[in-house]
Image: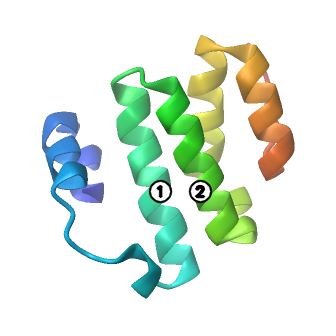
Amino acid sequence: MSVALALGDTGHALSLIDGARFNISDLLPSSQARYHLDIALARCETRKWDLAIRHIRLAHEAAPAFTRTQGLTAELVRRIGDASTVNVRRLSTTIGVPYIGR
């Protein structure tokens, strides 16, 4: 999924998300967080802001320190902020990633 997103193939990434056949709880917390951040990125690409926020929160629950230090998290917060500043301010406070509006 990460490779599909990096190549800009959101459709393929979404099909991988929908077809995932593994137990996420078997992954290390940081891997769980990265998986959720990738899903959040795919949801941002399709403008599904509420789902993106949900997965950022799940990433934070799995590995708070990891999530706060990832550049992807800050980028996701910025993208969501471009769409809805109210929700992103709450999200950024919750996960400890600053929101810097444009």
Inspect the image, locate mark 2, and give the three-letter code of the amino acid beneath it.
Leu
Residue at the image position 70 percent from the left and 61 percent from the top:
69
Q: In the structure shown, which secondary structural element does the residue marked by tag 1 occupy?
A: helix
The answer to which quarter of the image holds residue 1 is bottom left
Q: 101 or 20: which is nearer to us?
A: 20
Q: Are marks 1 and 2 in contact (CB under 8 Å)?
A: yes
The answer to which quarter of the image holds residue 82 is top right
The residue that mark 2 highlights is 58
Residue at the image position 15 percent from the left and 57 percent from the top:
19
- Give above or below for 50 relative to 64: above
The answer to which quarter of the image holds residue 67 is bottom right
Q: 82 or 24: which is nearer to us?
A: 24
Left or right position of 49 against 77? left
The residue that mark 1 highlights is 36
Inspect the image, locate mark 1, and give the three-letter code of the amino acid beneath it.
His
- Give above or below for 54 relative to 1: above
Residue at the image position 57 percent from the left and 79 percent from the top:
29
Labelled disc at residue 62: none
Q: CA distance from mark 1 to mark 2?
A: 7 Å
Q: Label 2 neighbourhood size at 10 Å, few (<14), some (14-19), many (20+)? A: some
Left or right position of 40 against 14? right
What is the image's colouring? rainbow
Left or right position of 12 against 42? left
Find residue 55 and report its horizontal and vertical position in percent.
53, 48
Find residue 57 and report its horizontal and vertical position in percent.
65, 50
Residue at the image position 44 percent from the left and 29 percent from the top:
44
Find residue 15 and report its horizontal and vertical position in percent.
14, 46
Q: Quadrant of the C terminus?
A: top right
- Give above or below for 63 relative to 20: below
**Chain-order first, disc 1 or disc 2:** 1
Residue 70 visible to an observer of this rendering: no
